[in-house]
Image: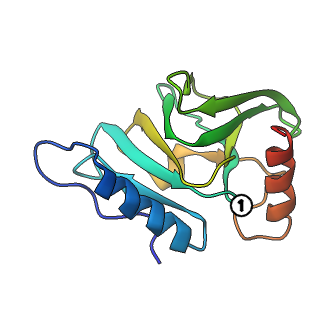
Amino acid sequence: MANALPHVEGDLFQLDERTLQRGIEASRASARRRMILPLHRQQEAPVQRMLNFFQPGTYVRPHLHPLDGAIETIHVLRGRLGFCLFDEEGRITERFDLRADGLGLIDIEPRIWHGMVALESDTVILEIKQGPYCEATDKVFAEWAPAEGASGFKKVTARLEAAFS
């Protein structure tokens, strides 16, 4: 299964319950336990907007964005997200329990180690970042954090989830 649903089309997108359910169901069925719905109409868009649908047991591998201007804004629309900042050795330096209660917003500047975990089923976030997306330059992954599905992935995910219990 793909990591993303097809880009939305047309001049206007309005989030509705049907779209939320489609993304949630896709995340439940995904081996990664998450799914992206790109809201930007073209991959080359200068502003990337997407909905990310998360299930517990997944994590966004700790990383930083190395380029100037590579900001990232995250707003929790549904559920609960654990957002962590790290030092270079992988120690959690700050943690933010983001909830869909109107205060679940975070904005991060470039070159800051961060990662996130779903703390509730069917968590949905809106993510906004500078584009166009280029896999080779967008992120630098932390060497101490294994890729999703790799050996040790579940241990790191559990450690991050436990930071919020």
Question: Is 43 displayed left or right of 165 in the figure?
Answer: left
Image colouring = rainbow
Question: Is 54 displayed left or right of 143 in the figure?
Answer: left
As drawn, 120 above or below 129: below
Quadrant including the C terminus: top right
Residue type at mark 1: give it. Answer: Gly
Q: Is residue 16 visible?
A: yes
Q: Going 89% across and 39% down the picture, which residue do you hit? A: 89
Query: Which element is circle 1 on?
Result: loop
Percent of width and height locating residue 144:
84, 51
Question: Is 5 displayed left or right of 76 in the figure?
Answer: left
Percent of width and height locating residue 60:
64, 50
Between 6 and 89, the one nearer to me in the picture? 6
Image quadrant in which you'd find residue 58: bottom right
Percent of width and height locating residue 6:
30, 64
Badge 1: how crowded within 10 Å, few (<14), some, or many (20+)? some
Q: Going 60% across and 65% down the picture, which residue do you hit? A: 33
Q: Is residue 3 visible?
A: no
Question: Is 108 displayed left or right of 157 in the figure?
Answer: left
Percent of width and height locating residue 104:
56, 27
Report which residue position mark 1 lands on: 57
Between 8 and 130, the one nearer to me in the picture? 8
Between 125 and 148, the one nearer to me in the picture? 125
Taking the view exactly as shown, the residue that stands out farthest to the left is 11
